[in-house]
Amino acid sequence: MTFDLFADHDLQQPDRLDRIGEQAVVLRGFALPWVDSLLAALTPVLRQSPFRQMQTPGGYTMSARLSSCGALGWTTDHQGYRYSSVDPLTAQPWPAMPEVFLALAEAAASAAGFNTFVPDACLINTYCPGAKMSLHQDKNERCFDAPIVSVSLGLPAVFQFGGFSRSDTAQRISVFHGDIVVWGGVDRLRYHGVLPVKTGHHPLLGEQRLNITLRKAG
Ligand code: MD6
Ligand code: FE
């Protein structure tokens, strides 16, 4: 057996910033000091609004399972994509946005050059091995002035970051446990997606990739 001392994730610097667009960056390892408190806050959120599979308006079943917290949550079904203040699964308001999510979102946005980011919506996705997210734009938000802050946890994945039309060639960026991708400004409406997650086992999260995306939707 070879000793994989210099795998990509071992070379991560705690304060590395990789620029992937004029106003888009990957903050390597930025969430690592926050992981324990993020996961602790996530448990009651997911008890109240559990992960569920959703249908796209075109009739496909999404492979990632989703939930939300915050004033607004995101859902999709045969009627379309939308934000709403009530979780259709529970017929209750979405769980409140944990303070630690707000604090991390603000800190990450600021490190990426976006000041005073106050998200009102948080999408939580779990990807089991094989699950993916096809190229899409995040455009259900009321306005596009605020950035998207996307926290990767658990199994690694390849994040695709494309152009302004679906057919534009996309950069492929490996994202690891603790990395945060922030895109906004001129890059806010870029197509992006996630290639099928490879099988693996993460010491904290097991056989899954978790993604927490913070937005200002309303
Ligand atoms: C990611 N997720 O999982 C990126 N967008 O790294 C997304 O871009 C995304 O998970 C809209 C709705 C759900 C998502
Ligand atoms: Fe997205």
Image: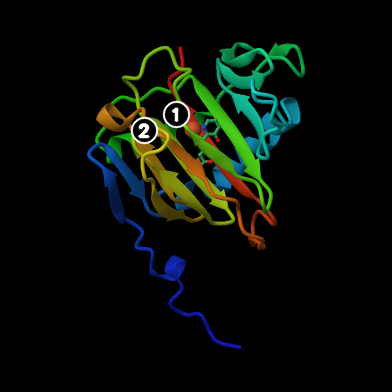
Return the mark for residue 137: 1
Q: Give the percent coordinates (x, y) of residue 66.
A: 65, 32
N-term mark: 2 or 1: 1
145 on left or right of 201: left
Q: Residues within 10 Å of mark 1 (few under 14, many from 20)?
A: some
110 on left or right of 62: left
Q: Secondary structure at mark 1?
A: loop
* Residue 85, quarter of the rendered image: top right
Taking the spot 34% from the left edge, 37% from the top edge, the residue there is 163
Return the mark for residue 125: none
Return the mark for residue 190: 2
Taking the spot 64% from the left edge, 62% from the top edge, the residue there is 203
- Mark 1 lies within 8 Å of ligand 2 (Cβ measured): yes
Q: Nearer the viewer, residue 186 or 68?
A: 186
Is residue 140 shown above or below 13? Answer: above
Q: Give the percent coordinates (x, y) of residue 113.
A: 24, 35
User: Given the image, on which type of amino acid does mark 1 rest?
Assistant: Gln
Query: Quadrant of the image for the N terminus?
Result: bottom right
Q: Residues within 10 Å of mark 2 (few under 14, many from 20)?
A: many
Q: How many discs mark residues in the rendered view?
A: 2
Q: Nearer the viewer, residue 200 or 79?
A: 79
- Mark 2 lies within 8 Å of ligand 2 (Cβ measured): no
Q: Residue furthest front?
A: 167
124 on left or right of 138: right
Q: Secondary structure at mark 2?
A: loop
Taking the spot 74% from the left edge, 30% from the top edge, the residue there is 50
The CA distance from mark 2 to mark 1 is: 6 Å
Q: Nearer the viewer, residue 180 or 99?
A: 180
165 on left or right of 125: left
Task: Check whether the beta carbons of the residues at disc 2 and disc 1 lie within 8 A of each other.
Answer: yes
User: Given the image, on which type of amino acid does mark 2 rest?
Assistant: Arg
